[in-house]
Image (spheres, grey):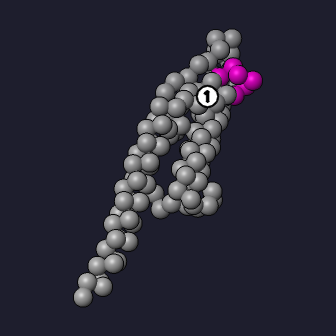
Amino acid sequence: MLKGLGGLGDMAKMMKAAQDMQAKMAEMQETLANSVVIGEAGAGLVKARCTARGDITGLDIDPAILVPSEKEVVEDLIVAAIKDAQARAAQRGQQEMAKMTEGLGLPPDFKLPF
């Protein structure tokens, strides 16, 4: 008579798994927001700091390169350092996502929809 209720247990398990995944995603986002990566350019003359989410938080420029005639070079180094920091941030994000999907029993290259 209550045969149809067997599926409710499976639905409850799926809902619990979805809630667990949501909690793990929130935890991962928090970890990425608090992790700092540093990108460099010009053999370390310019360094850019950003969170592992890709938000730039600072620059460090060696004063030796702050010569007015080298303005364009400095600008290029700043852009390169920022791009390096963002690439490192993306890599860190992928590493954290791989850890999370592995913990859920998903293949490492599994792409979540968010």
Q: Is residue 107 magenta?
A: no
Q: Position of residue 65 (x, y in %)?
A: 68, 16
Q: Picture quarter containing residue 80?
A: top right
Which of the two residues, 8 or 41, is positioned nearer the viewer here? 8
Mark 1 sits on what residue? 38
Above or below residue 85? Residue 101 is: below
The residue carrying pointer 1 sits among few (fewer than 14), some (14 to 19) or many (20 or more) residues within 10 Å by Cα, namely many
Picture quarter with the N terminus: bottom left
Q: Position of residue 9 (x, y in %)?
A: 34, 71
Picture quarter with the C terminus: bottom left
Which of the two residues, 99 or 52, is positioned nearer the viewer here? 99
Q: Is residue 42 magenta?
A: yes
The kind of residue tagged 1 is Ile
User: In the displayed image of the protein, which residue is found farthest to the left?
Assistant: 1
Q: Position of residue 79 (x, y in %)?
A: 61, 33
Q: Residue at x 43, y 38 (%)?
A: 30
Above or below residue 64? Residue 25 is: below
Magenta region: which residues?
A: 41-46
Q: Residue at x 73, y 25 (%)?
A: 42
Q: How many marks?
A: 1
User: In the displayed image of the protein, which residue is found farthest to the front?
Assistant: 1
Q: Picture quarter containing residue 49?
A: top right
Q: Residue at x 70, y 22 (%)?
A: 44
> Relative to 55, is 108 on the left or the right?
right
